[in-house]
Image (spheres, rainbow, N blue to C red):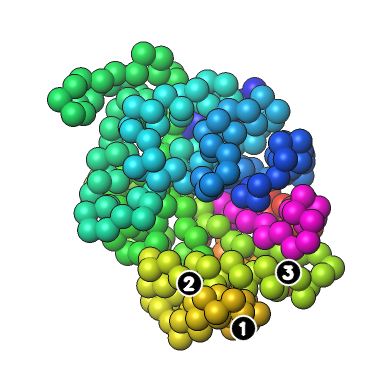
Amino acid sequence: MSGEGGGARPRGLGFALRDPLPWSAFAAAGGEGEALGYRAVFLPEIAGRDAVAALAALAGETRELLLGTGVLPMRSRTPMLTAMGAATVQERSGGRLILGLGTGAVGRGALEELRRTVRDVRDLLEGRAVERGGRRLRLALPPGSEVPIWVSAMGPRAFRLAGEIADGALLNWCTPERVVEARAAMARGAEAAGRDPDGVTIGVYVRSWVGEDTAAAMRALKAAAGEYAGYPAYARQFEQLGMGAEAAAARAAVAAGRPDEVPDVLVHAFTAFGDGARDRLEAYRQAGADLVVVYPVAAGDPAASVLGTLRGLAPGPFRA
């Protein structure tokens, strides 16, 4: 097996797997994504599979695919447990892990807590001891190769923090214009910390769909957009991007059980849909995203829909 290690800046197209597919379909999607030329797979950690355990299993069924957590909420595990899981995947995959960490649903002071978490996890993975709760902790089996740590980032402060401390940032529900802003803010953060801005990767999740049943797909994308518009952090981001009124309408529509009333313009602004999907993905790349992550939204049969989107958007000219 081979991997790029922490010093590489992966480019091209990745993909995300979120839908609760049976393991056979889940593993098949991972293997097919690799065969299609995608550079990386990211697993959001939701109320389904443990992302670290699932990546360790996928490591044995793939050879070149980078394996990302996208992302682990920092309070879902202690830094030691996070490092232990990361070291396991890194070892099993031959150095292909991207460790994505995020704040999760927390309030004031969350970014500073994320800074400390990234520092402690990196120290543990690199064989150094950390102090936690009055105890001195050290990983017994560090992976022996650098694990790139990415952070989820939504606003200017988070973008700057990513430039200061992380190997990459993972954006979500944003426009290409937001990628431009993120790149500039990350560069400022990196320069302030004495780091090379070119060493920080930008990945961006883009909800995507291609297929035949456009009506079903639009319903699924509207439901997803309305769901995220109900989260305060995403509501703020939508507002900052000039879509505050549309996001408010989306929240109200989903709360009333009428997701079909989510404004079409909100979906088209933040997703890659139908015949224009490939051009939309290219717009994110042109804006400065190194790794554009196709995030299939299932319409109809989940496994068939996810695979259909991955096949329809297979990298081709995007592959680095």
Q: Which mark is residue 261?
A: 1
Where residue 34 sits: x, y (%)? 72, 39
Amino acid type, mark 1: Glu
Badge 1 element: helix
User: Which quadrant of the structure image shows residue 119?
Assistant: top left
Q: Residues within 10 Å of mark 1 (few under 14, many from 20)?
A: some
Badge 2 element: helix
Check the image and report above or below for 228 versus 244: above
Badge 3 element: helix
Q: Are marks 1 and 3 in contact (CB under 8 Å)?
A: no
* Cα distance in 3D space between marks 1 and 3: 14 Å
Is residue 186 in sight in this rendering? no
Q: Which mark is residue 217?
A: 3
Residue 19 shown left or right of residue 153 in the figure:
right
The N terminus - image quarter = top right
Amino acid type, mark 3: Ala
Q: Which mark is residue 153?
A: none
Where residue 114 sits: x, y (%)? 29, 46
Q: Which residues are magenta?
A: 289-308
Residue of label 2 = 229
Q: Which of pointers 2 and 3 lies earlier in the amino acid sequence? A: 3
Extreme residue in the right direction:
212
